[in-house]
Image (spheres, rainbow, N blue to C red):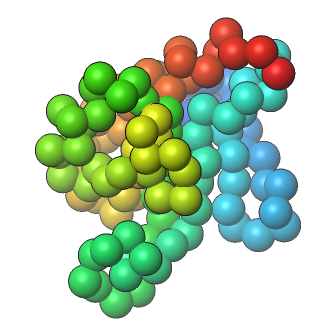
Amino acid sequence: MTKPELVSYVRDYYSVNPDYPWDDENYVLRHESNRKWFAVGLAVRYLRLGIDCDGTVDIIDVKCSPLMMGAYLSLPGILPGYHMNKDHWLTILLDGTASDETIKELLEISYEMTKGMRR
């Protein structure tokens, strides 16, 4: 799944449009009701993620239960949260490494975990 495909999916499935709070290509996906983030999308150099590869990759960080982290971290394209609390957030590469099914599953988990949080 690419960044445009992810944004389209989230718009269609969750009725959420990306918010661009930093005046660049990086964005957050947040609940309308409580304004809490359920995902953040960033463009990051592969090397910053510990991946020995040239260039930049689109990623999305999603919230995940610490009890479930190990299972997901064993999957291709899933890393500890970049620039987030690594006990509660995962990073997903949007370069075709992670499966679309895994991305959708993790988005749903993050969405559900954050929807009841107070502002």
| Residue 24, x across and y down, in percent | 76, 69
The C terminus, quarter of image: top right
| Residue 25, x across and y down, in percent | 69, 67
| Residue 49, x across and y down, in percent | 38, 70
Tell me: residue 112, above or below residue 9: above
Name of the residue lying farthest toward the bottom? 54
Query: Which residue: 36% across, 38% down?
Result: 103
Camera-nearest residue between 18 and 52: 52
* Numbered-mark total: 0
Task: For residue 8, say whether it is visible.
Answer: no
Query: Which residue: 18% across, 52% down?
Result: 76
Task: For residue 91, say whether it is visible.
Answer: yes
Compared across the picture, whether 14 is left or right of 87 comes to right
Tell me: residue 16, above or below residue 77: above
Camera-nearest residue between 81 and 3: 81
| Residue 39, x across and y down, in percent | 58, 40
Name of the residue lying farthest toward the top? 116
Compared across the picture, whether 9 is left or right of 26 comes to left
Tell me: residue 112, above or below residue 79: above
Q: Quadrant of residue 109?
A: top left
Q: Quadrant of residue 2?
A: bottom left
Compared across the picture, whether 77 is left or right of 59 comes to left
Query: Which residue: 21% across, 36% down?
Result: 70
Compared across the picture, whether 96 is left or right of 41 comes to left
Query: Which residue: 82% across, 63% down?
Result: 22
